[in-house]
Amino acid sequence: MNDFDMLAVSETARNGELPQNFWDDLSSGWRFHKEEPAWPVDEKGEKEKAVLLKTTFDSPAESDVTVSFLHSCGIPCFKYYAKEGGAGKVINGFSGYGADLYVPASHLEEARALLNAEPIFDEDNS
C-alpha cells in the first residue's frame, strides 16, 4: 500500500486515535465519507430552486438509500421533514409523516428517470 503503514495505524488506533489522513491515504482511493454533489447555481450565482422529488417512508432502507443513490449519480438530494416530522424523528427515531426528498429543478427529470428505470438483465446476472 503506497507508503501506508498499517502497523502504525493499528498502533495509533489502540490509543483511541486515527491519523488525520487515515481515510485519504488508502491506495484504493476509497473514502469513508464521499463529498456530496454541489448544489447547482443559476446565472446570478444563486442556488437553484429545490423541488419535491418524492415522499418516502423515513427509513434507511428507503429514504437514505435513495439519497445515496442519487448522490452516486451526481444528483444533489436532501431529506426534509414536513409538519411535525422532525420532532417524530427525534422522539421515535423516524418520522411518522415520512420524509420529503428534494432535488434541484434542473435535475428533476433525470432523478425521476433513474428511480423509475427498469433493471437490465443479461445472461450473467439474470
Image (cartoon, rainbow, N blue to C red):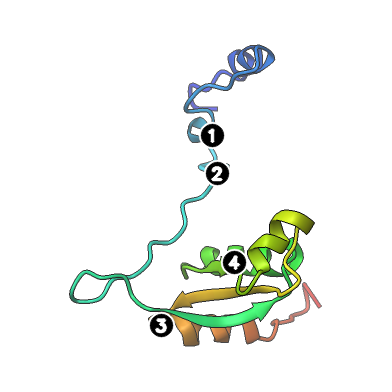
Q: Earlier in the sequence, mark 3 or mark 4?
A: 4
| Eye-nearest disc, 2 or 4 | 4
Q: Could you tell me the amino acid type at mark 2? A: Trp
Q: Are marks 3 and 4 in contact (CB under 8 Å)?
A: no
Quadrant for residue 16, please give it. top right
| Eye-nearest disc, 2 or 1 | 1
Compute the Cα span from label 2 to label 4: 19 Å
| Residue at the image position 18 percent from the left and 74 percent from the top | 44
| Residue at the disc numbered 1 | 23
Dot label at residue 67: 4
Compute the Cα span from label 1 to label 3: 34 Å
Q: Secondary structure at mark 2?
A: loop
Q: Is residue 36 above or below residue 83?
A: above
- Residue furthest to the right: 126
Within 10 Å of the Cα at label 2, are there few (<14), some (14-19), or many (20+) other Cα atoms?
Answer: few
How far across and down, in percent of the image, does residue 35 sit? 46, 52
Quadrant for residue 120, please give it. bottom right
| Residue at the disc numbered 2 | 30
Compute the Cα span from label 4 to label 1: 22 Å
Q: Could you tell me the amino acid type at mark 1? A: Trp
| Residue at the disc numbered 3 | 105
Q: Are marks 2 and 1 in contact (CB under 8 Å)?
A: yes
| Residue at the image position 53 percent from the left and 28 percent from the top | 22
Q: Earlier in the sequence, mark 2 or mark 4?
A: 2
How far across and down, in percent of the image, does residue 82 sit? 60, 74
How far across and down, in percent of the image, does residue 26 sit? 54, 33
Within 10 Å of the Cα at label 3, are there few (<14), some (14-19), or many (20+) other Cα atoms?
Answer: some
Judge left or right: residue 94 versus residue 32.
Answer: right
Compute the Cα span from label 2 to label 1: 7 Å
Q: Is residue 28 above or below residue 104?
A: above
Judge left or right: residue 71 versus residue 61.
Answer: left
